[in-house]
Image (cartoon, rainbow, N blue to C red):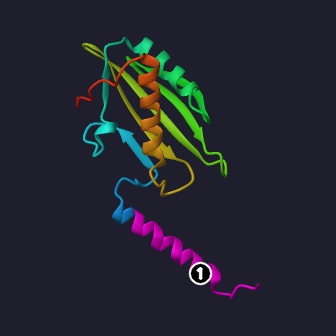
Amino acid sequence: MRLPRHAPTITLTALALLAAYLWLEHPEYELAHAAIAAGTTDPRLAPREFALPTGELEQAVVRAAHRIRNWEYVGSAGMGEVTLLSFVRRARIFDRAEDVLIRIEPTAGGSRLTAESCSRMTWLDLGQNARNLRRILLELDSVLGGSPPTPRAP
């Protein structure tokens, strides 16, 4: 079967319309970015506070990420009292990658965790970056052996 000459144009137009629909009708589908930060619309992605020192929380986050398939620990960096942990999540199809950056900072009662996930190649992630962050929080709760702490805004 031979496609008409205008088929690629129609396909690209259909994809653009689908992307616009998803972006307008589903605000949870961020534009290739999601964050665990104050003021987020998803309460599951609110900053988390833990009654652990930053070093222990850092080790727990790395253990949690090792339990997730297709996650790779890239490394950590300290900026004063703040620790940054870097991970890459690779998709099974097309070798797409998302960068996940987790920030751990000390608080009076322990540590606060914030994070962000960002796609490298696409401008519409269909919610994958938010799923990355929810997944690391779920695994972290499992590693720490308890129910999730109550999210609190800073």
The magenta region covers: 1-22
Using residue 125 as the reference point, say whether residue 94 is left or right of it: right
For disc 1, the marked residue is 9
Tell me the residue at 42%/44% (across/down).
130
| Residue 42 lies in quadrant | top left
Amino acid at circle 1: Thr
State the predominant SS element of the stretch in magenta. helix
Tell me the residue at 23%/29% (across/down).
152
Residue 130, above or below 125: above
Q: Secondary structure at mark 1?
A: helix
The quarter in which the N terminus is drawn is: bottom right
* Residue toward you, 130 or 106: 130
Tell me the residue at 46%/45% (across/down).
129
Q: Is residue 69 magenta?
A: no
Residue 51, above or below 45: above
Tally of marks: 1
Using residue 16 as the reference point, say whether residue 97 is left or right of it: right
- Locate residue 106, reporting x and y percent: 32, 17
Tell me the residue at 52%/77% (across/down).
13
- Locate residue 17, reporting x and y percent: 46, 73
* Residue toward you, 147 or 24: 147
Using residue 142 as the reference point, say whether residue 73 is left or right of it: right
Residue 86, above or below 128: above
